[in-house]
Each structure stands twice: as C-alpha cells, then as structure tokens.
C-alpha cells in the first residue's frame, strides 16, 4: 500500500525555543521526515529562535545532530540531511525584550504561510504574542502553535486565552496535544463513523463499560519540579485522557471539519457528571529494592501529589446514561501501554447454558506500543467433546495489515505541524474546550485537597494501588491487564 503525500503550501515556520528539548527530540526530526516524504515545498523556511547566541551554521549543526540522534535516520542520508539544512536558519531573540526581533522580521517573506511555534513555557506566551504584533511579524492569516500546559486551573486557562485573544483570533490559535495526532486516535473516528458495524452498537444499550488506560514505566525523572506542581490529574487526565474520552463518547459530527468535531467534543465535557469522591483513587509510587520513590524524585519528603489516578466517570446524556467510563493513568507501572477498551454487554440469552461460561466482545484500540485494534469474538473451541466456547482476538496491527508503509507510522508531531501549515484545526483544542475541561477538573482537585486525602502507595512495576482494583471489583468488573 502506497501512502499518498500531499505537499503543503510554501511556509515560514519560526520555532521559539528552537534549541530546547522538544524542538530537538520531536519538532525538528518530524519536519525532516516530512521533507524526506516529499511533503515540504522547496522554498519552505524553518527558523529557530532562542536566547542562545548562535549563527546559522551552528544551529544547522545542532539540527543535524538532533536528526541523527532522535530521527531514526538510517546510514547514508548525509546528502538528504544537507538538503534539509539548506532550509534552516537561526536568530537570537529575547522573548521578553527587544533584541533580535528586527532581524527575525527581516527573514520573513511575503506571500507564504507564516507559523510560529511556541515551544516555550506558558509564562512566555503573552510576551511572544505581543511582540509578534508590535514588531509587524504577524499577519491576518498567521498561525501560532501553543504547547501544553494550557493553564494550571480554570482561572489561569481563562487568563491565557484572554492574553492570546488580544493578539490572535481563535482561528489562528493551534493548541497542540500530540495524542490527537496519533494514527490510532484518528482511526478511532474512522472505525466509529465509517463502519455501520459499530456505530449502531455505540451506546448504553450495548456497551457495558469503557476503559481508558495510559500507563508509563518511567518515573517523573528530571521533570520532578514541574510534575509535583501538577500531578497525574493535571498532567494527563485534564488533557490527554480527556481528549480520548471525548472522541470515544461524542456524537457523530455533521462533517469531519474543525468546528463540527470540536463542538461535539465540547458537549461531552459539559455533560460529564461530578465524580463521587469514592470513585477517585490517587496513588504515589513507593520505594522498593533500593529504587527511589516518588518523594525522592521530586525532592519533597511531604509531597501529596499523585503519580497515579483512577476515576469512574458518567456522562449525562441519552447515549451513555448508566454506562461507566473508567480512566487510569500513572507512572512506574508494569508496562508502557495506552489503550481504549470498549466492553460490550453479554448476549441477552445464552443458548449454550451456564457451563459455557461468560463471554463478551471487547474492542481494544491500542495507541502504543504496536498501534492497532483488536476485537475479541467468541467461537467454538476446536476439537471434539461438545460445544466449548473460547474468546479469540481478531487482530489488526497497522504494520501487519497495511504492509511496509505502515512500519513507519507518521509521528504525531509531524502530522500536526503539517495540519497547522494547511490551516486545519480539526485535531487541535479550542479555547472553550480547554476551559470546560478545567471547569470539570478543578472541583475534583479542590475536593481532595479540602478533605486532606493522601495518595495510596503502590509498588513500582505493579498495576497501581489496590484501591484502583477495588474501584472495578465493587462493580463486578476488572481492569484489563497492563501489558506491552
């Protein structure tokens, strides 16, 4: 199967924070891969901007090193990298001052798409947005890409949206969440809305419950200072898991276009019920075998920030009334895995009798690793001896089902950056969507803070605290096993 690559229009892309970790690991290697795929026009220009004193040659060397280290580049691509570097430039810019802005403006061209990637901390968003306008760099159709976190709570998210709105229209603001750029996440919409097989069953009448899991094997690592102020709820649930939640639960949009999709996602968030405190489990990984525990990693011996959280949620609408959604995410867990499991109800009557056991269809959408989907179906176990039933998976891994072209599934960042150049906001969050997510999240955080709740300890390499297992067991259900 041959992938169809559609070139984008000529563009100038400025990466503020162009020497930072995100730029080196994701943005620049992703742009290189789009160049290799033939999607980047010959006259595209990519300009790094940061405080570091550096010239074009020095930055190009940094970019080349980043591509070789993080881009998965096979041997023998030196000529290709050299051709890509011809599009690279650099300006030393003071985001909060006056230095470098005139020089940056001098590099910008008329008549092409202008995009500005804010790969910096949120505290600099307002300053950069203001200087883009005051220095005449932003045009009426310029675009800005804003990295998370989109605020720390509802008040800060509103303040951030107001700040950006002073200089840019909502149609120019691209709030990027790389989860929405994953191939399987987008395939979720295709499975739901392009197949008559599933959509008629996608409701409370046929779905028993839905599980959303994002598990990591790593701890907080070098992010301890940031993470301890956020925790799993702010760092993962309010954005990544909320987006998955919306896509799995939303009504069919009228069209696959930005505002239609985002309108339906917003309806899901606004229909979320408050979560009962007994349906919230927070955890914190503890020390075992001499490994550091969470408090060692964040250097706060009294920290009550959660590194794990599990929630039981409900949506107040006709489609999902009575169907629980179970969300969990955490660090230092048994395996690195992200998946959505749609567990369908039992058949209304079993003609095979109680001895056949209980069998359910489960649709599993795997985001990582090994992106793909599995549908568990019930069949007769082969062999003589009567009608014995067994569940078997119908497995579709992208690499197996779609051939060699699927072995290198496009990275989420490269797909989303190309959507910015095209002016397609479908996979980006809108301002009111971000605020609605915080409006649901804030009372949960305020509630456990007021109650003085502390996270339950759990062993690194486990599935999380025992209370998270009980959250499901009380309902006669169980989590799917976390495995690679």
Image (cartoon, rainbow, N blue to C red):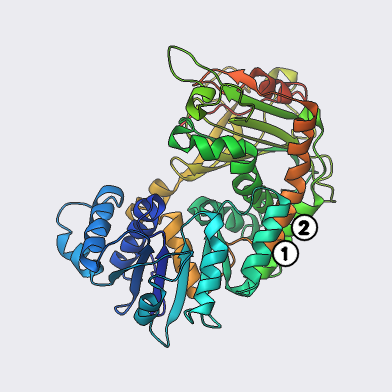
Q: Is residue 369 visible?
A: yes
Query: Where's residue 289, x and y in %?
Result: 44, 11
> Which of the pair 41/308 is nearer the observer?
308
Q: Is residue 324 visible?
A: no
* Vertical comparison of 351 with 198: above or below: above
Kind of element beneath mark 1:
helix
Is 55 positioned to the left or the right of 112 in the image? left
Label 2 CA crowd tier, 10 Å (few <14, some 14–19, many 20+): some
Q: Quadrant of residue 379?
A: top right
Mark 2 sits on what residue?
Answer: 267
**Quadrant location, the N terminus:** bottom left
Mark 1 sits on what residue?
Answer: 263
Query: Where's residue 384, x and y in %?
Result: 54, 19
Q: Quadrant of residue 343?
A: top right
Q: Which residue is most to the top? A: 289
Is 316 positioned to the left or the right of 377 in the image? right
At x 79%, y 53%, the residue is 270
* Vertical comparison of 245 with 390: above or below: below
Query: Where's residue 301, x and y in %?
Result: 56, 21
Labels 2 and 1 touching (C-beta < 8 A): yes
> Which of the pair 147/462 is nearer the observer?
147
Label 1 CA crowd tier, 10 Å (few <14, some 14–19, many 20+): some
Which label number is shown at residue 297?
none
Task: Give the number of callouts.
Answer: 2
Q: Quadrant of residue 56?
A: bottom left
Q: CA distance from mark 2 to mark 1?
A: 6 Å
> Which of the pair 385/78 is nearer the observer?
78
Is 222 positioned to the left or the right of 67 in the image? right
């Amino acid at each position: 199967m041959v992938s169809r690559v559609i070139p984008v229009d000529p563009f100038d892309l400025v990466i503020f924070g162009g020497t930072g970790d995100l730029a080196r690991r994701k943005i620049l290697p992703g742009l290189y891969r789009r160049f290799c795929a033939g999607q980047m026009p010959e006259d595209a220009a990519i300009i790094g901007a940061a405080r570091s004193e550096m010239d074009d040659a020095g930055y190009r060397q940094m970019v080349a090193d980043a591509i070789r280290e993080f881009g998965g580049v096979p041997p023998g691509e030196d000529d290709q990298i050299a051709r890509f570097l011809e599009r690279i430039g650099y300006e030393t810019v003071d985001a909060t001052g006056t230095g470098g802005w005139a020089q940056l403006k001098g590099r910008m061209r008329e008549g092409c798409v202008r995009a500005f990637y804010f790969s910096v901390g949120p505290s600099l968003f307002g300053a950069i947005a203001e200087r883009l306008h005051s220095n005449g760099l932003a045009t009426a159709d310029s675009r800005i890409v804003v990295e998370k976190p989109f605020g720390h709570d509802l008040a800060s998210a509103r303040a951030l949206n107001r700040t950006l709105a002073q200089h840019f229209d909502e149609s120019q603001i691209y709030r990027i969440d790389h989860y929405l750029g994953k191939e399987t996440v987008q395939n979720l919409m295709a499975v739901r809305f392009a197949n008559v097989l599933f959509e008629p069953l996608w409701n409370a009448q046929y779905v028993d419950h839905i599980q959303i899991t994002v598990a990591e094997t790593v701890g907080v690592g070098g992010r301890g200072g940031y993470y301890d102020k956020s925790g799993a709820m702010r760092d993962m649930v309010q954005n990544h898991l909320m987006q998955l939640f919306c896509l799995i639960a939303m009504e069919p949009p009228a069209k696959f276009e930005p505002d239609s999709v985002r309108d339906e996602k917003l309806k899901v968030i606004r229909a979320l019920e408050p979560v009962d405190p007994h349906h919230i489990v927070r955890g914190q990984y503890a020390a075992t075998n001499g490994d550091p525990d969470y408090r060692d990693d964040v250097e706060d011996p009294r920290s009550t920030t959660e590194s794990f959280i599990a929630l039981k949620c409900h949506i107040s609408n006709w489609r999902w009334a009575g169907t629980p959604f179970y969300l969990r995410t955490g660090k230092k867990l048994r395996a690195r895995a992200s998946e959505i499991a749609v567990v369908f109800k039992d058949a209304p009557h079993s003609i095979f009798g109680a001895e056949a056991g209980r069998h359910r269809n489960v649709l599993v959408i795997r985001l990582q690793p090994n992106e793909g989907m599995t549908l568990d179906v019930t069949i007769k176990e082969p062999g003589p001896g009567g009608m014995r039933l067994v569940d078997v998976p119908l497995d579709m891994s992208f690499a197996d089902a779609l051939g060699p072209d699927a072995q290198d599934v496009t990275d989420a960042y490269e797909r989303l950056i190309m959507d910015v150049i095209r002016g397609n906001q479908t996979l980006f969050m809108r301002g009111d969507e971000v605020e609605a997510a915080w409006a649901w999240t804030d009372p949960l955080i305020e509630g456990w803070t007021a109650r003085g709740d502390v996270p339950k300890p759990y062993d690194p390499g486990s599935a999380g605290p025992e209370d998270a297992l009980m959250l499901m067991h009380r309902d006669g259900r169980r989590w799917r096993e976390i495995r690679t």
